Image: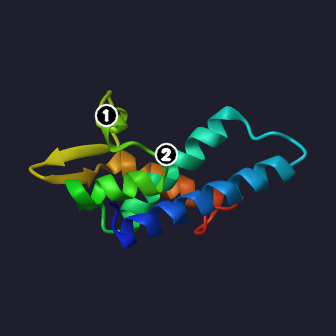
Amino acid sequence: MPTDSKIERLLAQIERNVAELREQLSESQPEPGWMVWFRRSGGFLAAMDERGGRLHRTEISRLAREHGYDPRGLAGFYTGDRPSLTLDGDDRVLTEVGQLHAKEWRHVFGANGRR
């Protein structure tokens, strides 16, 4: 049976998703696909940056879920020529590129993630 804190986290995520859906449905112009992707991925990186840029693997799993990711699906953040995250033992660390994406996200969406 899920714990109360897990249920509260899941409910909070659902509430955020519903609010985002309502906002998107109320807009006259649909948001471009890149913006939808960047809102989610950049928001995840910005939240990590706000927490110091270094999280234990269990903490990043929680943060990933809060931002709509299955923690098993984060591999893209660690790969490519310019990864956003790197591994350091059990810690997950925001790279300079990840910090830049977090900064760009805050510039586009503001501190609260709204445009």
**Amino acid type, residue under disc 1 in the picture:** Ala
The reply, left or right, for residue 28 in relation to residue 46 is right
Location of residue 79 with respect to 69 vertically, above or below: above
Residue drawn 63% across the image and 35% down it: 34
Image coordinates for residue 59, horizontal then vertical, percent: 27, 60
Residue 29 sits in which quadrant?
top right
Q: Tell me the kind of residue under disc 2.
A: Ser
**Residue 54, x across and y down, in percent:** 24, 60
Q: In this view, does 35 lie to the left or right of 7?
A: right
Instruction: Quickly name the residue at label 1.
Output: 75
Q: From the top left corner, tell me how far across and down residue 57 is, in percent.
A: 21, 53
Residue 36 in view (yes/no) = yes
Residue 111 bears which disc, if any? none
Work out whether 48 lies above or below 98. below
In depth, the one of 73 and 115 nearer the eye is: 73
Q: Residue 41 carries which label?
A: 2
> Dividing the picture into quarters, in which one does residue 71 lie?
top left
